[in-house]
Amino acid sequence: MRRAAEREGRRARRRKHREKEKKTSQPDTHHEGQSTDDEETETDAVKFRAETKRITSEEKAIFEDVIEDFSSIDSIKSRFEEWKNKHEDCYTNAYISLCLPKLFAPFIRLQLLDWNPFEAKSMEIEEFRWYKSLVLFGCGDDPYDIDVEDPDVKLIPAVLEKTLIPKLVGLFEHVWDPLSQKQTTLAIKLIRGMAEVYPNFQAQNKTTQSLFAAITTRMRRCVSDDVYVPLYPKR
């Protein structure tokens, strides 16, 4: 009942706004029930901002008891690069390339803590500090001289699979509103961009399958729970 009342209130506000602009704008082509219903109540907005502020303040304390050499991606990355450059055989035999995505995961998850790709102002994946730090990992002084057989070349796709996509699964399940045109447009842009850039983001990949399963489940839930079909007058 509360949701229905809030929905009708939003429609009334939009209807009033359209009536004010009707005299100076094009003929009204709006049909009741077809608006993007992505407004949130002030109560929910205040609660969300307060909770976000609390979480981000606690974030700063996570690495308080960690010495500086191990408290950031850059400091850890430099140690492994030094190991690889000086003792490459040892580095390879220890299968370090397989360990790196899990090793960097806590730092990446921390930077993604308040990331919401369904907001227009959100950062692109390639804009994050962790991405800029890891994209040339192990390339040495010449980033154009890349050994395609080097497993470290696949570090970013591996991070995508192990850390980023699981984050997106949760966002699509609990944050994305399929009825919001703005959010859905940004979601399509995100998924399309990942498919074009990352070779392991494809239908045969199990992690990618889990993401699309989450999207499909959310859409089905939206249809069954949230879709409102208005009753049109006979005219």
Image (cartoon, rainbow, N blue to C red):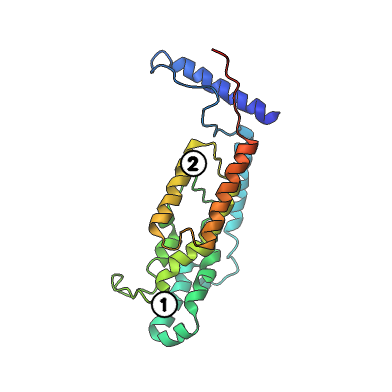
The quadrant of the rendering that contains the C terminus is top right
Left or right of 28? Residue 140 is left
Placement of 54 over or under 228, stated as above or below:
below
Q: Residue at x 55, y 22 (%)?
A: 13
Q: Quadrant of residue 153?
A: bottom left
Mark 1 highlights which residue? Answer: 81
Q: Quadrant of residue 185?
A: top left
Q: Amino acid at mark 1?
A: Glu
Compare residues 122 and 50 and report the one nearer the observer. Answer: 122
* Mark seen at residue 184: 2
Whether residues under marks 2 and 1 lie with C-beta atoms below 8 angstroms apart, the answer is no
Q: Provide residue 168's location: percent of width, then percent of height.
A: 54, 53
Placement of 96 over or under 170, stated as above or below:
below
Q: Residue at x 32, y 73 (%)?
A: 146
User: The residue tagged with tag 2: helix, strand or loop?
Assistant: helix
**Label 2 Cα crowd, 10 Å radius (few <14 / some 14-19 / many 20+):** some
User: The residue tagged with tag 1: helix, strand or loop?
Assistant: helix
Compare residues 155 and 123 and report the one nearer the observer. Answer: 155
Quote the CA–CA distance across marks 2 and 1: 40 Å
